[in-house]
Image (cartoon, rainbow, N blue to C red):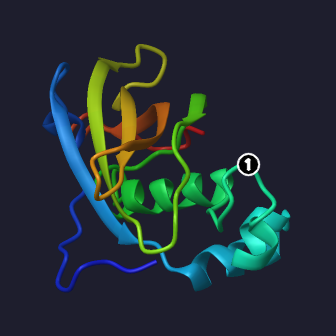
Amino acid sequence: MTKPPAAPLRHLDYEDFTVGETVPFGYTKVTKADIVRYARAFDPQPFHLSEETAKDSNIGRLIASGYHTCCMMMRMLADDLIGGPNALGSPGVEEVKFLKPVLPDDELRGLAKVVEKRELKSKPGVGLIKCFLELHNQRGETVMSWDMTAFRRIPGKGASGGAA
């Protein structure tokens, strides 16, 4: 997994998110070695392990594990959108869809559409952000989507953290 040279890290604060806005984030180039390394460690199905063993699959070639794709998206999110000192975790991801296979040499970028934003009454100083995320390859194809919820500290509002 590679990032373009000098890619700045960007962590948006609660007030930077606007409902209805679409925010681009992240970049990674997926290598054959990345796909195989992840598969050997976590998802050793034949179509993730080698071009040769993938020939008999329904895709007919080496593809990244869907879970590997989720991990790449999470890394891009943490590096370029929701990480940083105001990150307070997440209650979970609601729906993940694997729409197209991720192939060696694919270049992936994300888009986050902000669908909800609210301050938590039960936890002063903590905000909740809901986004619909898409991961696109260099051909403009959507390869994966998911609905994400994240907790953010609201600067100046006294959040002590601790949200899971």
Residue visible at 25% across and 53% down in the picture: 25
The answer to whether residue 67 of the structure is visible from this angle is yes
Name the residue located 67 percent from the left edge and 58 percent from the top edge.
65
Q: Does residue 79 appear to the left or right of 59 in the view shown?
A: left
Q: Position of residue 5 (x, y in %)?
A: 20, 86
On screen, 97 above or below 36? above
Residue 158 spot, x, y in % from top left = 31, 38
Q: Percent from the top left, x then y, of residue 122? A: 48, 16
On the image, the x and y values in percent for residue 92 come to 60, 33
Amino acid under disc 1: Asn
Density class for disc 1 (Cα within 10 Å; few <14, some 14-19, many ≥20) is few
Task: Please name the residue shown 30% across and 19% down the image.
Answer: 115
Q: Quadrant of the C terminus?
A: top right
The residue at the point 20 percent across, 47 percent down is 24
87 horizontally vs 146: left or right: left
> Residue 114 lies in what quarter of the image?
top left
Q: Quadrant of residue 21?
A: top left
Q: Which residue is mark 1?
A: 58
Of the pair 99 and 128, the residue shown nearer to us:
99
What element does badge 1 sit on? Answer: loop
One can see residue 91 in this view: no
- Residue 73 lies left or right of residue 53; in this view the side is left
**Residue nearest the viewer, comparing 2 with 142:** 142
Q: Nearer the viewer, residue 85 or 117?
A: 117
Q: Nearer the viewer, residue 52 or 148?
A: 52
